[in-house]
Image: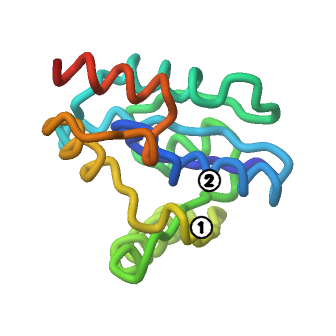
Amino acid sequence: MKVIYPGTFDPVTFGHLDVIKRGVKLFGSITIGVAENPGKKPLFSLRERVEMLKESLDGMKNVEIKSFDSLLVDFAKTEKASVVLRGLRETSDFPTEFQHAIVNRVLDPGIETVFVMTSEKNFYVTSSIVKEIASHKGSLKEFVPKPVQERLEKKFG
């Protein structure tokens, strides 16, 4: 069974890394799908987001990182994945994640979505909050890996 963990990862946070590590523990291996997602107007380019993931996961086994610019179900088909892994931080994530899971199931009944709860240490961390802290020159060490912290500090000078 092949598993994908999709996201924009703008930027990758310790919350994302928590879901990735737990996904590998649950499924043995996962493919991380970095979405182009221009509608979200990412701070970092697709290439930069892929690079940050590679730097942040340096040495982690059984993880593959790929980018995509399509419907998630089409990316899943391309990857021959039958499971989409998603992380839930707290209750406000659930309605949107539930809706996406149902739409994906309608588009491709062969795809199942599996949700994991992020650890209590990371349940409040979002990429948006991280960017806000970075824009005001706040400390990022509790939220993102060092390579991401350095790139954010460079972006916000």
Identify the residue shown where x is 43% and y is 47%.
143
Few, some or many residues within 10 Å of mark 2 (<14, 14–19, 20+): some
Q: Position of residue 94 (x, y in %)?
A: 41, 79
Q: Quadrant of the C terminus?
A: top left
Residue positioned most to the front: 139
Q: Residue furthest right?
A: 28
Q: Please give the name of the residue rendered at 23% of the width and 36% of the height, measured from the top-left corner.
A: 134
Q: How many marks?
A: 2
Q: Is residue 117 left or right of residue 140?
A: right
Left/right of residue 89 with respect to residue 61 in the rendered view: left
Crowding at mark 1 (Cα within 10 Å: few <14, some 14-19, many 20+): some
Q: Nearer the viewer, residue 38 or 154?
A: 154
Give amino acid for label 1: Ser
Q: Where's residue 12, x and y in %?
A: 45, 39
* Mark 2 in CB contact with mark 1 (< 8 angstroms): yes
Give the answer, above or below, for where 150 lies relative to 43.
above
Residue that label 2 marks: 18
Q: Nearer the viewer, residue 150 or 112?
A: 150
Q: Secondary structure at mark 2?
A: helix
Local SS, label 1: loop
Q: Earlier in the sequence, mark 2 or mark 1?
A: 2
- Please name the residue that numbered disc 1 is placed on: 119
Q: Is residue 118 above or below residue 156?
A: below
Q: Amino acid at mark 2?
A: Asp
- The colour scheme used here is rainbow
**In the image, residue 130 above or below residue 156:** below
Residue shown at the point (14%, 39%) measured from the top left = 136
74 or 29: nearer the eye?
29
Whole-percent x, y for residue 46 in the image: 36, 24
Residue 9, percent from left and from top: 41, 40
Residue at screen point 81% across, 60% down: 26
CA gap, disc 2 and disc 1: 7 Å
